[in-house]
Image (tube, rainbow, N blue to C red):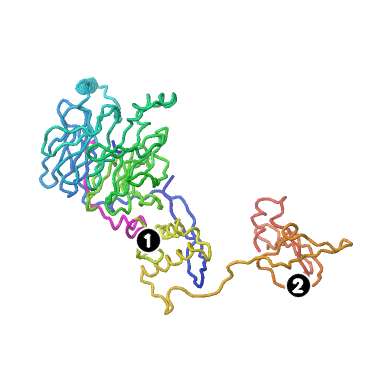
């Protein structure tokens, strides 16, 4: 099978930042936890159930023209396992594509619409015996709790839509499944644990593999005819459920932790390498699928509890906090988009009898982009001067909009926005782009106001400090005994008396706490004032919080 509370920004202050000859205003924010917000009513409309027959159905994937869906369903007489079916979305006609025996899963329609890809165990000599065993258990009321089978007899087949014998593309011992064609139909990405059957394993890995066949799963790539096999991942734990992006340049999948308890969403380059982790929810996040725009992906997660999988969105760079999509109790998972991005297919238990079936809904892409704080693409847009797409916002000020802007301002290209650096220049350009996007008219000179500022300071060659009063004059060592601060006055200072003022603190009386004044009756006019850093050590926490007030 393919397969921390939501946070919120709050504004607390404003600050100015300067670049070479420019200044612009940004927001300073803090991160606070708040409940996850579902957006089902905003993102999905015209929700309708697509499949009704059988014990359960799922994993509906569109043809390249959006006219058909291929899916798996338990509905075959005499076979308790999934078989593959093709459904015409206009006529409703449904035909079985797989042989009808054994187990099947993970189908995909070739871009030319003439062939179907799926995984099957029908060539397993014991396929019929396994069917009878499962049927007997169910008849006796001893049906196993539902769990996915990583049967080592799974192989990937392609079959003509018109019928005929399916062609075995993998033909190796091990679980070969979860396959999908690239957009041009030249490549197949799939998941397999075949190397666990053909390569020596350590004693530890042998024990793990005996109890968990998914532990050795990795992503593979091969030509559409099964040639030029490449292994793309080698991490310990289950890597599976790969899909190509609409342009064929990326693969998205989910990676389970070694103990199989959690899973996160990853992407990589189709050629291999360039791995990027998109989610960090620390729960089970799986079954990711790119939107055709390439701007974001949809996935399922049990962030709301193991019995309540919901759909979430994450931007293609993984920079924003995932956004919740569904809010219906039960299972919502295995989501896929139609090629035009206007329809969502997913598997849900929101049926009358709570069985899992396939649902369709109209998808609102613009609202998804706004919720993620995106305008177009993956967040990088060459049409803006900053090179970072301006976050889409609404007329009313909201924490979501502010969070989207700050996410962009805190992104890697900004490199911390240190005054005078390239990252700071990009940040100021971004804010100018944001002003333009909301229609804020600039002054005649534009959005920037030129001014001079001190970019830095360094010590000169003639810094000296002489201390007296001990019967002799001492020369203090620079950078060992003392150091002038950058805002120190330039020039000589005449010999002057030094006055000690403790910690240099002045704090008025407040709520039962006595006033504190380090200067008291000291006469400091025209004298050096020597003070200690920090705060007194032997005071209560209450007084400590009061003292820094100047």
Q: Nearer the viewer, residue 56 or 41?
A: 56
Q: Which residue is drawn at 32% across and 59% down?
A: 376
84 w.r.t. 337: above or below: above
Give the label on residue 254, or none. none
Residue 370 is covered by the magenta coloring: yes
478 w.r.t. 140: above or below: below
Which percent across, then down, holds residue 471?
Answer: 89, 62
Residue 326 is left or right of residue 14, and the answer is left
Which percent across, then down, holds residue 94?
Answer: 12, 39
| Residue 54 appears in the figure | yes
Q: Residue at x 28, y 49 (%)?
A: 248
Residue 156 is covered by the magenta coloring: no
Quadrant in the picture for the C terminus:
bottom right
Which percent across, then down, holds residue 36?
Answer: 39, 48
425 w.r.t. 314: above or below: below
Residue 380 is left or right of residue 352, and the answer is right
Give the label on residue 492, or none. 2
In the image, the segment drawn in magenta is 351-377
Between discs 1 and 2, the one toward the N terminus: 1
Residue 251 is left or right of residue 73, and the answer is right
| Residue 354 appears in the figure | no
Which percent across, then down, holds residue 194?
Answer: 32, 30
Residue under label 1, please give it. 391
The CA distance from mark 1 to mark 2 is: 53 Å
Quadrant in the picture for the N terminus:
top left
Query: Which quadrant of the view contains residue 303?
Result: top left
């Amino acid at each position: 099978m393919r397969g921390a509370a939501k946070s919120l920004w709050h504004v607390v202050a404003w600050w100015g930042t300067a670049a070479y000859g420019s200044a612009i205003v940004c927001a300073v924010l803090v991160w606070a936890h708040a409940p996850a917000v579902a957006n089902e009513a905003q993102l999905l409309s015209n929700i309708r159930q697509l499949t009704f027959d059988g014990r359960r159905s799922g994993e509906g994937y569109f043809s390249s023209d959006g006219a058909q869906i291929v899916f798996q369903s338990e509905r075959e007489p005499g076979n308790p396992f999934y078989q593959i079916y093709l459904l015409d979305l206009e006529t409703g006609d449904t035909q079985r594509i797989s042989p009808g025996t054994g187990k099947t899963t993970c189908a995909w329609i070739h871009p030319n619409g003439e062939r179907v890809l799926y995984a099957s165990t029908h060539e397993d000599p014991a396929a019929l015996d396994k069917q009878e065993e499962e049927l007997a258990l169910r008849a006796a009321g001893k049906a196993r709790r539902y769990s996915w089978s990583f049967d080592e007899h799974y192989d990937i087949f392609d079959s003509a839509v018109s019928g005929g014998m399916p062609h075995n593309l993998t033909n190796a011992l091990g679980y070969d499944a979860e396959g999908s064609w690239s957009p041009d139909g030249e490549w197949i990405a799939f998941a397999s644990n075949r190397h666990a059957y053909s390569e020596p394993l350590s004693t530890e890995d042998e024990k793990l593999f005996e109890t968990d066949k998914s532990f050795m799963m990795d992503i593979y790539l091969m030509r559409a005819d099964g040639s030029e096999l490449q292994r793309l991942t080698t991490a310990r734990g289950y890597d599976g459920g790969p899909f190509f992006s609409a342009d064929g340049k990326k693969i998205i999948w989910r990676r389970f932790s070694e103990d199989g308890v959690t899973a996160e969403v990853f992407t990589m380059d189709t050629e291999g390498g360039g791995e990027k982790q998109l989610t960090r929810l620390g729960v089970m996040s799986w079954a990711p699928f790119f939107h055709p725009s390439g701007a974001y992906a949809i996935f399922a997660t049990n962030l709301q509890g193991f019995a309540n999988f919901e759909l979430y969105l994450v931007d293609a760079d993984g920079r924003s906090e995932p956004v919740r999509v569904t809010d219906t109790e039960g299972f919502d998972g295995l989501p896929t988009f139609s090629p035009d991005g206007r329809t969502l297919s997913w598997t849900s238990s929101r049926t009358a009898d709570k069985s899992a079936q396939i649902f369709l809904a109209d998808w609102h892409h613009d609202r998804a982009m706004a919720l993620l704080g995106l305008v177009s693409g993956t967040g990088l847009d060459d049409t803006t001067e900053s090179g970072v797409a301006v976050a889409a916002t609404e007329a009313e000020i909201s924490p979501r909009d502010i969070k989207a802007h700050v996410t962009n301002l805190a992104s890697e290209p900004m490199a911390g926005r240190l005054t005078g650096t390239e990252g700071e220049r990009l940040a100021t350009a971004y804010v100018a782009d944001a002003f333009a996007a909301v229609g804020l008219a600039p002054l005649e000179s534009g959005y920037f106001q030129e001014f001079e500022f001190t970019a830095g300071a360094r010590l000169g060659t003639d810094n000296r400090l002489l201390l007296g009063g001990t019967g002799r004059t001492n020369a203090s060592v620079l950078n060992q005994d003392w150091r002038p601060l950058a805002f120190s006055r330039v020039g000589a200072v005449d010999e002057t008396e030094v006055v000690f003022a403790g910690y240099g603190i002045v704090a008025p009386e407040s709520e039962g706490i006595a006033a504190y004044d380090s200067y008291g009756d000291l006469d400091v006019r025209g004298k050096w004032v020597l003070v200690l850093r920090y705060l007194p050590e032997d005071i209560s926490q209450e007084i400590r919080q009061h003292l820094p007030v100047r």
